[in-house]
């Protein structure tokens, strides 16, 4: 599933930031985002907003890690990164190019790209991912005030939100197609 690959730099960052410094996690995210972008360009695929947004965000984090107060960013980088990812997804929706549409175009024949089913499914899937990112961000923000619940707030709830978004992404297009009226053959 291509969409999951688009989140790979973020997932790598989330795992590393919990177990290492945010600077090394940001550097790994930057390298992964850059590699993903280069890989897609090498295969003649257009860069995606998720890849470009990730590259920019992780570059900012690396620079901040080298120049700013490490204590603040070590404490808040996970929350800020969830907010950054939610913002990237939201911006893609608001400008009329939901990020999920870019991934859908790689797996759906071009003649269906303008169909109401395709347009609606990619928009709704993008909103589902936005919701998952908001849940992750809010959950991780609560961890900062309730560190004793960090297993739930930094791991179980965020992973649950991502799994729910993945399952929804797999289920919704088929559900939407099944709701369309069937035309009987003549």
Image (cartoon, rainbow, N blue to C red):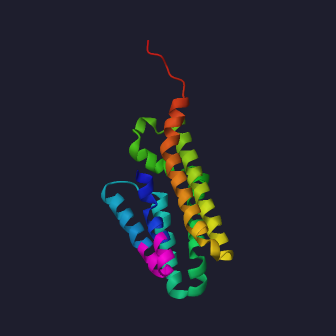
Outermost left residue: 42
Who's the residue at 51% across and 77% down the image? Answer: 61
Q: Quadrant of residue 150?
A: bottom right
Q: How many marks?
A: 0
Who's the residue at 36% across and 54% down the image? Answer: 45
Who's the residue at 41% across and 52% down the image? Answer: 2
Outermost top residue: 186
Taking depth in this image into account, of 64 and 176 the one nearest to the observer is 176
Measuring from the top left, give residue 171's x and y in whole percent: 50, 42
Taking depth in this image into account, of 126 and 18 the one nearest to the observer is 18
Quick check: 10 above or below 65? above
112 vs 42, left or right, is right
99 vs 45, left or right, is right
Quick check: 25 above or below 175? below
- In magenta, the rendered stretch is 15-28
Who's the residue at 67% across and 74% down the image? Answer: 146
Measuring from the top left, give residue 36's x and y in whole percent: 38, 63
Quick check: 68 above or below 118? below
Measuring from the top left, give residue 172's x and y in whole percent: 53, 41
Secondary structure mostly taken by the magenta-highlighted segment of the chain? helix
Measuring from the top left, give residue 143's x and y in whole percent: 64, 72
Q: Quadrant of residue 131?
A: bottom right
113 vs 125, left or right, is left
Q: Is residue 16 magenta?
A: yes
Taking depth in this image into account, of 95 and 34 the one nearest to the observer is 34
Viewer can see residue 20: yes
Q: Is residue 26 magenta?
A: yes
* The C terminus lies in quadrant: top left
Viewer can see residue 47: no
């Amino acid at each position: 599933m291509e969409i999951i690959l688009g989140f790979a730099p973020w997932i790598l960052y989330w795992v590393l930031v919990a177990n290492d410094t945010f600077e090394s996690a940001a550097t790994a995210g930057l390298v992964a985002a850059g590699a993903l972008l280069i890989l897609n360009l090498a295969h003649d695929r257009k860069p995606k907003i998720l890849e470009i947004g990730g590259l920019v965000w992780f570059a900012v984090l690396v620079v901040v890690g080298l120049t700013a107060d490490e204590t603040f960013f070590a404490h808040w980088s996970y929350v800020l990164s969830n907010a950054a990812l939610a913002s990237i997804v939201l911006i893609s929706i608001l400008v009329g190019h939901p990020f999920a549409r870019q991934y859908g175009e790689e797996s759906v024949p071009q003649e269906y790209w303008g169909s109401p089913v395709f347009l609606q499914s990619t928009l709704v899937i993008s909103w589902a991912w936005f919701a998952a990112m908001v849940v992750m961000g809010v959950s991780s923000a609560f961890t900062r005030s309730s560190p004793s619940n960090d297993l739930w707030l930094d791991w179980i709830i965020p992973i649950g939100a991502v799994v729910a978004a993945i399952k929804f992404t797999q289920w919704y297009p088929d559900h939407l197609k099944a709701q369309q009226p069937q035309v009987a053959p003549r």
